[in-house]
């Protein structure tokens, strides 16, 4: 019996992925070896890597200029790898500050060039997405965080610019349909929406590369990873395998069109309860609410611990808000079943009837 898992990441995975992976841990595809015991350059693993890369490309409908990589180091490594590869020391990059993760990206970029923070929602406690900003034409690229995992805000309309857009999609990758070709570099730790911790997906336009003067260490050079088919060194084989299975599952859900419908339904159900239940209040402004991380508080904070305990009894886990903001956060990523949101909403209704 599984619980209703609202963890922010690593987070819930589809049952069929876990089932298949558990079998592969013992015997991968009748090879007599565990997936963990197979050389990464064997035909068996090469096929896994190829399928993971091509499924990600297919689901996002990326054009031919893009290469998809599965790298180590988490999304956090991308905070430095992006400017190291794209920003020369005298050049400027534009960043939009929508919270903790944007700030970490800004801090790293400053090690490599100038950073122009062209907008920030800091003064609103990061409860909205900035709408007014000028994007400087001379900037090398614009960096945004498409979904703000901690504050529960999300870009529903992407900024329009001729500059290359770099997007940190760690917490909403492959959760909705959009024109992914409007971006030049998409990166995401795969552990929320498309797999297990240990791999980072990077989709990058080849035409972006080769334009900085500095010497780039081999392991941090996108070009080297591309030339080596995302196999420059031993890849995180198990994480890539889980991603490949999760991408197959996503495709079977009707791809991004299918999952988007389910995700919208889950978010609507939960936000509707938050808006109508007198005990709870959403923290993000309505138009910028995230369909992935639903953040809310109680006007009676003294009841918060009691509610958490009550939820635990109901097999609802992972809803405590991030340590920096408190309150509650229900992460409703791709693999979270609709029924889990129904159970959560019932728990909110019941608790509120007892308390109001
Ligand atoms: N960006 C965002 C939006 C995130 O939510 C996270 C992780 N929660 C990260 C970056 C950092 O990811 P990682 O732990 O894979 O480095």
Image: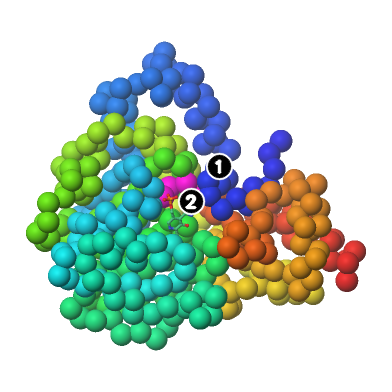
Q: Is residue 57 above or below residue 83?
A: above
The numbered mark at residue 193 is 2
| Between marks 1 and 2 in the image, the one whose residue lies nearer the viewer | 2
| Furthest residue in direction front, as rendered | 111
Q: Residues within 10 Å of mark 2 (few under 14, many from 20)?
A: many
Q: Residue at x 23, y 71 (%)?
A: 114
- Label 2 lies in ligand 1 vicinity (Cβ under 8 Å): no
Is any atom of residue 303 visible in this view? Answer: yes
**Label 1 element class:** loop
Q: Residues within 10 Å of mark 1 (few under 14, many from 20)?
A: some
Q: In this picture, which residue range is highlighted in magenta? A: 189-193
* Quarter of the image with the N terminus in it: top right
Q: Is residue 163 above or below residue 248?
A: below
| Furthest residue in direction right, as rendered | 354
Q: CA distance from mark 1 to mark 2?
A: 10 Å
**In the picture, residue 43 is in which quadrant?**
top left
| Furthest residue in direction left, as rendered | 213
The earlier-in-sequence mark between 1 and 2 is: 1
Circles 1 and 2: CB atoms closer than 8 Å:
no
**Label 2 element class:** loop
Q: Residue at x 44, y 53 (%)?
A: 255
Magenta stretch encompasses residue 191: yes
Is any atom of residue 62 visible in this view? Answer: no
Residue 54, x across and y down, in percent: 30, 44
Q: What residue would you read off at disc 1?
A: 14
- Label 1 lies in ligand 1 vicinity (Cβ under 8 Å): no
Magenta stretch encompasses residue 258: no
């Amino acid at each position: 019996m599984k619980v209703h898992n609202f963890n922010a990441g690593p987070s819930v995975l589809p049952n069929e992925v876990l089932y298949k992976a558990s079998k592969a841990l013992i015997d991968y595809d009748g090879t007599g070896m565990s997936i963990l015991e197979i050389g990464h350059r064997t035909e068996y693993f090469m096929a896994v890597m190829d399928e993971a890369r091509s499924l990600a490309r297919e689901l996002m409908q990326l054009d031919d200029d893009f290469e998809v990589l599965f790298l180590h180091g988490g999304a956090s490594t991308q905070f430095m790898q992006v400017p190291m590869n794209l920003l020369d020391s005298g050049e400027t990059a534009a960043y939009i500050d929508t919270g903790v993760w944007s700030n970490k990206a800004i801090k790293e970029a400053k090690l490599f060039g100038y950073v122009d923070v062209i907008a920030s929602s800091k003064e609103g406690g990061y409860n909205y997405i900035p709408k007014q900003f000028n994007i400087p034409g001379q900037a090398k690229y614009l960096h945004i965080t498409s979904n703000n995992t901690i504050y529960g805000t999300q870009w529903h309309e992407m900024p329009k610019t001729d500059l290359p857009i770099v997007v940190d999609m760690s917490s909403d990758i492959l959760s909705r349909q959009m024109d992914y070709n409007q971006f030049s570099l998409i990166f995401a730790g795969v552990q929320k929406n498309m797999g297990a911790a240990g791999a980072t997906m990077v989709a990058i336009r080849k035409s972006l590369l080769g334009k900085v003067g500095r010497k780039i260490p081999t392991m941090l050079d996108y070009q080297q990873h591309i030339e080596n088919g995302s196999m420059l060194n031993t890849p995180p084989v198990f994480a890539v395998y889980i991603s490949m299975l999760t991408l197959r599952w996503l495709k079977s859900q009707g791809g991004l069109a299918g999952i988007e419908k389910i995700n919208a339904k889950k978010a609507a159900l939960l936000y509707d309860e938050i808006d109508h239940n007198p005990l709870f209040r959403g923290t993000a402004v309505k138009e910028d609410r995230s369909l992935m991380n639903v953040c809310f508080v109680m006007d009676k904070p003294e009841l918060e611990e009691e509610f958490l305990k009550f939820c635990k009894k109901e097999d609802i886990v992972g809803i405590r808000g991030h340590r920096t903001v408190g309150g509650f956060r229900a992460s409703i990523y791709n693999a979270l079943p609709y029924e889990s949101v129904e159970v959560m909403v019932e728990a909110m209704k019941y608790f509120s009837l007892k308390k109001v």
